[in-house]
Amino acid sequence: MRKASREMDAAFALEVLDKAPYVTVSMTRPDGSPYGLPLSLARTDEKTFYFHCALEGDKLDCIAHCPTVFLSAVTKCAPTVGPKDGSFTLQYKSATAVGKAEIVTDREEKIAALRAICQRFLPHHMDAFDNAIARSLERTAVVKITLTGSPVGKRKQYDKEGEEMTNEREQSQTRHKAKWTVLSDNRSSDSRLSTEHGLSILLEAEQHRILLDTGASDVFIKNAEQLGLDLSTVDYVFISHGHSDHAGGLRYFLEQNTKAKVIVSPDAISGKFFSKRGNLHSITTEWPEIDDDRLILLDQNFEIAKDLYAISHIPQIHPMPKGNQNLYVQNSDGNYIHDDFRHELALYVNGLLFTGCAHSGLENILSACRWPVKSVVGGFHLLDGQESEEELQELAERLKEKYPETLFYTSHCTGDNVFEVMKGVMGEQLQSFRCGTIIKFNFLKL
């Protein structure tokens, strides 16, 4: 790149590719002439994109002749006059990447890819997805593009002082200190703190204080008092899903905090949840009354505030935790059906991804996250005695390969043996937490 100061990293490039309304895909025709067109792409991990098309046509002819493709996208594109020199110029964010295209033949992968595409572009209409698949799957082609190298980003923008933003100038401007403290968990590192089967974490960032789940009871409040933490200043409560071990403490929190917004899926509030581990028993939350002006009900991906994103309706592309097999929801007829976890949300803030229990599967949540992930925090719902040791090792290998720079912190519904098996593969990349754990870190402002 001629101006190295405008070159941005792979994470920036992936974000541009994700946010662009379309991506231009360039190919080579069988006669050697160029062919390119804008397409609606959905990304499922750091290397994989999908698009759909008819069963025949120029795109498939090009791919059969030469599978190498070139991707390009632009966002934040606006003509402007240079604030300092009065020059006519263009502000933009752009990305390019090279990949290999192939037609997807596996039925389950096709459906998963189409689900990801629909979730990306039509999240409000996912209820119609199954009927659409039944009607059109056999007459729809799906193409997978696997990146063969790191994507490259480029940016030209001016800051508030009228100076052109460069990657060098941002090194000292975009890092912000934060910390998270575990208030409720199955395990404790501090004899003063109580434990329970539940999870609650306080995330303190530059702009927000966010309570990540509330555990099963008021244990998190008592532990916060022991640690000298004031929960009355929390401005957001994020509820990852409807199970009582994550939302049961909400009613106690609302007695102490009169301002925090509650972020939750409407399906979490309306659902009736049960576990068949041992005897059939309810794990439904007793929801308190919440004023409408404090309730943020989400059934789609949503930017809650600057650099604070909720992820909804997580596509189930990768394997789901086997521990889900004992979890049910009661339908309107009173029948117990397997929980599909449409009520589960994940939260992303400045490089940190909170998974709650990760019932949707850790890999699926990571794939659904469109932003660079520096650390993953939460339960993995990998219970001892469910996945085989080989399956756990393979999962750990995939995480290590796809997310080599990401740190993983887990406890709660991650079994002790599971943790040891995965840590044997991931080493220092995988860490445990418990009540009283405090992690201070820097994150990058997007």
Image (cartoon, grey):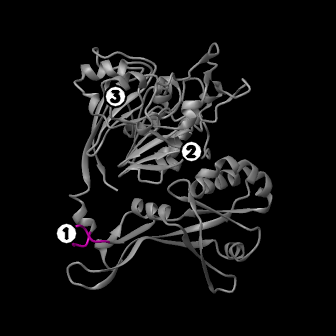
Image coords of residue 83 (percent x, y): 23, 78
Does the magenta-highlighted stretch encompass residue 284?
A: no
- For label 2, the crowd category at 10 Å Cα-Cα, with few meaning under 14, some 14 to 19 and many 20 or more, is many
Residue that numbered label 3 is attached to: 182
Residue 94 visible somewhere in the drawing: no
Q: Which amino acid does label 1 sit on?
A: Glu
Q: Give the mark toward the camera: 1 or 2.
A: 1
What is the C-alpha distance between the residues marked 1 and 2?
Answer: 40 Å
Q: 371 or 418: nearer the eye?
A: 371
Q: How many labels does the image show?
A: 3
Mark 1 or mark 2, which has the lower sequence index?
Answer: 1
Q: Is residue 271 above or below residue 443?
A: above
- The answer to which image quadrant residue 198 occupies is top left
Identify the mark at residue 314; answer none if there is no mark.
Answer: 2
Q: Answer yes or no: do the residues labelled 1 and 3 have beta carbons within 8 Å? A: no
Q: Badge 1, how many Cα within 10 Å: few under 14, some, many 20+?
A: few
Crowding at dot 3, Cα within 10 Å, few <14 / some 14-19 / many 20+, comes out as: many
Location of residue 239 (image quadrant): top left
- Find the distance from the CA under tag 2 to the CA under tag 3: 25 Å
- Which residue is drawn at the image coordinates 56% and 54% (left, top)? 44
Q: Are marks 1 and 2 in contact (CB under 8 Å)?
A: no
Question: Label 3 is placed on what type of residue?
Answer: Val
Residue drawn at (62%, 31%), measured in percent from left and top?
322
- Give the magenta range: 157-165
- Secondary structure at badge 1 equals loop
Q: Say which residue label 1 marks.
A: 161
The residue under the point 28% across, 66% down is 167
Can residue 371 be seen from the camera position used here? yes
